[in-house]
Image (cartoon, rainbow, N blue to C red):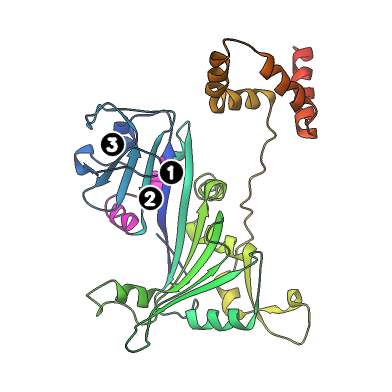
Amino acid sequence: MALYQGLEVIIDWLEFTVMDTTLKDVIDRILNLSFSEFSPLEKGRFGYQDQLKWKNGHVYVMFTAIGNEIDEDIRVKKEIGIHVMITGQGCKQYSLNNSLETLLRLLTEQDKVNFSRVDLAIDDYQSKIINYDKIHKSAIKGHFTSRWSKWDEVNSRQSSTGEFLGRTMYFGSQNSDLFCRIYDKSLERKANSDEIENIPNKWTRLELVYRKDRAKKLVEYVIKDEKALGHVLRGTLRRYLRFLIPSTDRNKSRWATAKWWDTLLANVEELQLTIKKEKKSIEDMAAWVDKQISPTIAAIMKAQEGDMGWLRKIIVKGSSRLTQKHLDAISTYQGSLNYD
């Protein structure tokens, strides 16, 4: 948790996969929880056959077991890893006795870990800076610019009275690796809680959902660069979204930034969240063939009793379809052989 301008910034979802390790190591050492606090669920998810749930909250551990007994010494399929999902509610429950930032640090020290999703949320309990109605009005009137090409809104109402039960805006596609969600948190809490007395009346939440490479880059900023959660969230917003003061100038890019948006993003620079993908080498291509299609090749070879005529035809045909990236990889590989 971090505070900025009186606003609270938290990690509101964390999802990752740890490779080449044991179930006990993930639960006991990385999560710093006890295996005895987890109970097996009837089925897994996301392609994993088995799943455990933390008895004290919404922390889920997914894996595929080798054998039938689920205990501390269970062997799992290491090639697909052990997947952990800590939901929004789970983050709050986990944080009662553990630090999510410490967990992130431990994860970055692992040899092989993939971050599937990290959500950052900033709460304005009085809607003084982040105000749903103000943002919605600006969006409707087009008083903003954004790297995201679309925005949506989802509303739900009470049938008998027409009163709002929920109001949410999305900037960016919900299927993308990075998008922004802004919603009336007071309505959301009142719709899902029997105790409404302690819920603030003007509570707006802004969330950023980071997936895959964007999530990986977010963790790098927080752990390696030691940037505060609020800094990363606001730096992302500065790069992707800007609310404006309308003027007669037809070019929106020259409109002044809304004062409340300037207040929110004061003293923070744009953060680059894309990761430059490395070019695939011949070794990478060989590893891909080995992992993805070697069983298929073996099956065909066995069915045709070792006849490789069909494979030669495929190779000749593929030679005519080589692109520049393939030629570059060939040149690099042959150059390294000559150098050696």
Q: Is residue 196 left or right of residue 141?
A: left
Which residue sits furthest front?
304
- Are there few (<14), some (14-19), or many (20+) residues within 10 Å of tag 1? many
Q: Nearer the viewer, mark 1 or mark 3?
A: 1
N-terminal of the two: label 1 or label 3? Answer: 1
Secondary element at image label 3: helix
- Which percent across, then down, holds residue 99? 35, 50
Magenta span includes 90 = yes
Relative to 19, is 146 above or below?
A: below
Please state the extent of the stretch shown in magenta in the rendering.
Answer: 89-106
Disc 3 marks a residue whose amino acid type is: Asp
Give the total of numbered labels: 3
Which of the 4 image quarters holds residue 27?
Answer: top left
Amino acid carrying label 2: it is Leu
Residue 193 against residue 64 in the figure, above or below: below
Residue at 53 percent of width and 65 percent of height: 180
Dot 3: within a 10 Å radius of its alpha carbon, few (fewer than 14), some, or many (20 or more) residues? some
- Residue 122, percent from left and from top: 45, 66
User: Which one is earlier in the sequence, the residue at label 2 or at label 3?
Assistant: 3
Residue at label 3? 28
Judging by the rendered image, the residue that carries numbered circle 2 is 100
